[in-house]
Amino acid sequence: MPRLAPSSSDASRRMTKVRQTGTDAELALRREMHHIGLRYRIGYVVLKKPRRVADVAFPGRKIAVFVDGCFWHGCPEHATWPKQNAAFWREKIEANRQRDADTNDRLRSIGWTVLRFWSHESPTDAARTVAHMVAKADTKSCASLSSVKNRRGK
């Protein structure tokens, strides 16, 4: 993707302040998950080639959590299309969407559960969803463990 000159110095200043990790939405979700007792890894590399990093991960349970910003990932409810450099931004956001779909497909193909939340979603609801999936993974793990023990006659 070609590098564009900023449309103005104000735009440049605004864009340099945009965080890639530790966004307000991500921090709120992590706070809620911690509050309900979940322990997790932050900024976990879930794929090496191509390199993909989950915002939050439960590696032993193979659960990857992503918090997607409405602008950057093209939220159907809140995304806006910039008027300045419109073609560049449309291409950028569409590329982000394609990368997200590719990440989902690659992770699912190797047994990961992928959870994606929009930054506008309730962190409490999102944390409950994550907790439900963690509990489900734990139950599945316990069930497979007990079936192994039963096959061994223990």
Image (spheres, helix red, strand yellow):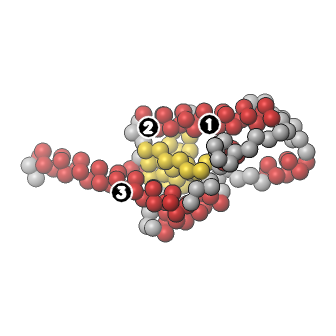
Question: What amino acid is found at the position of numbered circle 2 in the picture?
Answer: Arg
| Disc marking residue 97 | 1
| Tag 3 residue | 135
**Dot 3: what SS?**
helix
Q: Residue at x 83, y 39 (%)?
A: 83
Mark 1: which secondary structure?
Answer: helix
Q: Residue most toward the front?
A: 77
- Number of callouts: 3
Q: Write down the residue under mark 2.
A: 108
Which kind of residue does numbered mark 1 sit on?
Answer: Arg
Q: Specify which label sits upstream in the sequence, 2 or 1.
A: 1
Give whichever of 137, 132 is nearer the camera.
Answer: 132
The residue carrying pointer 3 sits among few (fewer than 14), some (14 to 19) or many (20 or more) residues within 10 Å by Cα, namely: few
Of pointers 3 and 1, the one earlier in the residue sequence: 1
Please give the name of the residue rendered at 44% of the width and 48% of the height, measured from the top-left corner. Answer: 63
Query: Residue 119, how many percent across, how many down?
Result: 62, 53
Q: Secondary structure at mark 2?
A: helix
Note whether 115 is above or below 33 in the view shown: above
Amino acid bearing label 3: Ala
Left or right relative to 23: residue 60: left
Q: Counting residues from the N terminus, which is met first, the one under dot 2 or under dot 3?
A: 2
Q: How many angstroms separate mark 2 from mark 3 (CA)?
A: 18 Å
Is residue 94 shown left or right of residue 59?
A: right
Considering the image in quadrants, where does the N terminus appear? top right
Counting from the top left corner in percent of width and height, residue 142 is at 26, 53
Residue 127 drawn at (x, y percent): 49, 60
Rendered residue at 29%/54% (across/down) = 139
Q: Mark 2: few, some, or many residues within 10 Å (few <14, many ≥20)? A: some
Q: Residue furthest left?
A: 153
Report if the CB atoms under discs 2 and 1 are less than 8 Å apart: no
The residue sitting at the right extreme is: 8
Is residue 51 in sight in this rendering? no
